[in-house]
Image (cartoon, grey):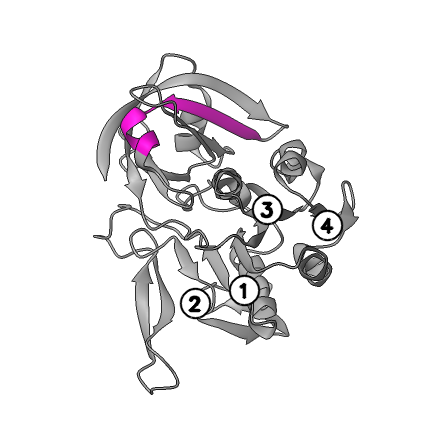
Amino acid sequence: MLIASGEVLTHKKYGEHFHSLTLVAPRIGEQVAPGQFVNVSCDGNRSFILRRPFSVYRVHKRGGWAATIEIVFDIRGPGTKHLAELRAHSTVKLLGPCGQGFKLPAARSHCLLIGGGIGAAPLFFLADELRNEGHRVDVIMGARSIHRLLNAIDVRRLASVSRITTEDGSMGQQGVVTDVIDDMVERCSSDIVYACGPHPMLAAVAQMCNERALPLQVAVEELMACGYGVCMTCVIPVLTGSSRSGSEERVYARVCTEGPVFDGATVCWFESEGRVTPEWAEPSSSGSPSRTGADAPQAELAPPGN
């Protein structure tokens, strides 16, 4: 993990809501792996005492001292508002690469990537790396509406086969990502699934993969403060050991260090009112999980992707 300064190379927007910063950060850019994140310091105001964690959306490794990383986000509070106002040649302080990234298959495989809203950001970097290693990449991307999809045009360029779902039917098939998983797995002969998005979506994907004996890696989103394992605010329940040998144990893992990527079969999910939700999701006043849909709003200190 490195502390570095990143110079803003470009600021742009994807659609109406999502901002992108491309940062010249050669040391981090040369080391970061898909699924890892960077902690960004929001200077200029004493209220920005905590860094903001962002998953890495794209990386351009040009060798030497020219590597860049790209992060995407929408404005959730004063910290991200400050970042959205940065322009070329501004400088930000970075901590990274942080956490554990995705594990790429050892043998050539058919990989199905499933993303929800802006939470899908790390899947673009992952898709680039998988394709570079000779793996087949297929993608399912979902959101509430066309306005909450992240770079849908690029999704189609990255994937051999792609499916887009929106809850309001404004683009692709009306519905949610789980509506099309069975068809995509059969059509693409998927060997492994990678998913990133809001908790309820990940829980539903995990259940479907478990029923089909498909390996699944999930990039989990969770509130965090320090970003390097000290404060213990981002812990989630996971299973370790083996149920067959009787050594299985339920423990708490830190998303910022043991994650954000986990084996989807080890995360503790449970059934709530007929819908699969993560065990740690707090219900809202309506009795539903506080994070719902393909890209539910998240607090500004939400982890990678916001």
Q: Secondary structure at mark 4?
A: loop
Q: Secondary structure at mark 2?
A: loop
- Residues 258 and 49: in front is 258
Mark pair 2, 4: CA separation: 26 Å
Tell me if mark 1 has few (under 14), some (14-19) or many (20+) residues whose alpha carbon lies within 10 angstroms of its own.
Answer: many
Mark pair 2, 3: CA separation: 24 Å
Q: Nearer the viewer, mark 4 or mark 1?
A: 1
Mark pair 3, 1: CA separation: 22 Å
Kind of residue indicated by mark 3: Val
Q: Nearer the viewer, mark 3 or mark 1?
A: 3
Mark pair 1, 2: CA separation: 9 Å
Q: Is residue 155 magenta?
A: no
Q: Secondary structure at mark 1?
A: helix
Residue 273, percent from left and from top: 61, 74
Q: Is residue 24 magenta?
A: yes
Q: Which residue is mark 1?
A: 203
- In the picture, measured across the screen, residue 241 lies left or right of residue 205, that is left
Q: Write the residue at 21% across / 52% down.
A: 230
Q: Which residue is mark 3?
A: 137
Residue 158, percent from left and from top: 61, 37
Q: Nearer the viewer, mark 2 or mark 3?
A: 3
- In the picture, measured across the screen, residue 261 lies left or right of residue 144, that is left
Quarter of the image where the N terminus is located = top left
Q: Which residue is mark 4?
A: 167
* Labels 1 & 2 near each other (Cβ < 8 A): yes
